[in-house]
Amino acid sequence: MNHDLAFIKPGLSLYLDAEPMTVRSVGEGRVLMRSGTFLTPRTLTLERFNELHVLGRLVIPVEREAMAAAERARLISIAFAAFTPRQQSRARKLYEYVRAYDALPSGSRSRDALQAIMVVADRQDDRAPPGERSVRRWHAIWLKHGRSLPALIPLIERRGGRRSQLHPIAQSLMMAAIHEFLVVGNAPIVAAYRALNAAIERHNEQQAEQIPEVNRMTVYRTYWTLSRFTRVAMEKGRQAARRTFATVTRGMRPTRLNEIWEVDHTLLDIILYDERLNLLLGRPWITAIIDGYTRIVMGFYIGFEPPSYLSVMLALRHALSPKDYVRDLYPGIHFSYNTGGRCERFRTDRGREFTGESLLDALRLLFIDHDPCPAEQPWYKGRIERWFSTVKTRFVQTLPGNTVRARDRAHDPSKYACIGYKSFIGFFHQWLIDDYHQSLHAGLNMSPAMAWNLALAREGGMPPRPAPTAGELECLTGIAIECTPQRYGIKWKHLTWQTPRFAAIRSAQPKGTKIKVKVDPLDLVTVRFFDPLTETWQVAKSTDPDYTRDLTLYQHRLIVELARREARDQEAITVKELLYSRQKMVAEVTALNAKRIKDSKTMLRYCNPASDGMAGLIVDIADKMESLPGWLSDGDRPAAAAEPARSDPKTWETRAPMIAVDPSRSAL
């Protein structure tokens, strides 16, 4: 029950935590109360006052007549048609008696009321007509509420002893026991009953006023008659209860093509298998971007990289780039994947990868507004959440090796895993383009592809807000850092890049001026920096190209960590030490390839940087070894494993190790 300040008046008696209190003053949204035992007053806000009353800690002995009047006032505000037919019929019946009584002259109502009542009773065939006092009472209620027909609705549910017969102190102690033992302590309900009677015994020993013991069934009925909101508020807090029972609202609905893009990650319920190395890869992550207006998937990234800016960057690059690679890599796909353009709003949740400076800077440079969802409201971007459910039910669960039945101990999904990473990427392209984009969408009453084509025709055949070129995209979506140009160039994470433009910037700008730099985590050979003199983006090359060639940022971090463990001075790491650490890391990875032993996620990510972000393809260990410079001598280089014969040249096969499996499994 929510109270207002008009109801809480000075002199009102109540019980707070079984302590008798009296309201002294009310005003400015606060209630000042004074206890009969302690002289120090107690001040509560109106919100806290209502919260304590809902939790049962504050008990108000309200008079029955006041509650009936409040209920009557509530009924007046309700439309007459909203009541049940029985209530409407009863109100019309009373209205006939009230109208006949009201038509009598005021001076002769007491004398002629009985005759008027009998006339109405004969007309309505009422065998039990009311008395003159009852009609007079109905007439007074009818006049008090402005001659309103709903005022005659009988309060049948209010009849009888509906008010609790418990002592207010016993009721407060019972609510406290229920909260402590059933919610906080997670104990059975009988424990609350025993604790309540123990508290009553202590009260009777200390106070002159004796309280009788409470029956066990009374405790049971009190708990089960509590509203669900009150139970959740007692268990998890009032804020959690408000979130649980709050009304779900819909975010801004898009009205045109590429107005709102929604992005999110999810872990797919399938275990992928490496046919070449005879190893399990584990469950991949997918980062997808969907257009809110047409429900078409603008871009995605599938890999073993956990949710980070790298996965968001690759998905964003895929969404902004043309999909010409589909015809070349997957000739079996019938329909085209002709999405493109640039969105106006980029809707995300509040994860660290979405609130970092790198993504925000990339969106600013792309002239895209960042639209983060409100906290703990995933329905704000419900389209991408619903699409993930579609992927799992209509695509992943139809493939061997899915983990949907993983809870069943008799089912081991690793025994059925026979799909490689590249095969899975190909199957996903085929399902996405030929199945999902062409299927009827219930929210659109057409397929996403048809909705895209119709919206594209309204835009003149070209997507609004054209996307940047591939070179500009790599620059704009890189990791944003700020560096001060020095004589040796710019340095970041033990890597150095140099260009003659740094000398011009140092000579023209004040000392210590920092410039904005964009680092591509998949290509460390070059970086892009913003030249404040020409106001253009320029390129700086690595001073150690032999080390940074075919090197990703994640690989570099592992190499630096290994070099720090072996170097005496953790800050002064030379390029020679980095080359040695990379040589050692590559040797360990190649040894894993030869021994077929179990591997960790870290080693998998080292071998699988997913450098081809557009198609989302993996890089083979053997191909990686062949592309490395000759840092290893022929005698030190481990022998590469023999490549098995490929059964189908059109099959997209996987190439990265993780967990050793039984070689007797069958291929897809």
Image (cartoon, rainbow, N blue to C red):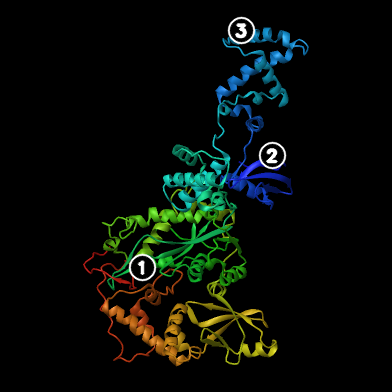
Callout 3, which amino acid? Asp
Q: Which residue is mark 2?
A: 7
Q: Residues within 10 Å of mark 1 (few under 14, many from 20)?
A: many
Q: Residue at x 49, y 66 (%)?
A: 315
State whether residue 297 is above or below residue 116.
below
Give how far apart the Cα atoms at labels 1 and 2 are: 70 Å
Q: Residue 426's x, y, as percent?
A: 37, 64
Instruction: For mark 2, give the secondary structure.
Output: loop
Near-viewer residue (44 or 561): 44
Near-viewer residue (653 or 178): 178
Instruction: For mark 1, give the secondary structure.
Output: helix
Q: Residue 362's x, y, as percent?
A: 58, 70
Callout 1, which amino acid? Lys
State whether residue 81 is above or below residue 599.
above
* Quadrant location, the N terminus: top right
Q: Residue at x 57, y 33 (%)?
A: 163
Q: Is residue 229 visible?
A: no
Residue 422 is marked as 1
Residue at the far right in the pictured view: 107
Residue 212 is marked as none
Give how far apart the Cα atoms at labels 3 and 1 are: 89 Å
Q: Which residue is mark 3?
A: 122
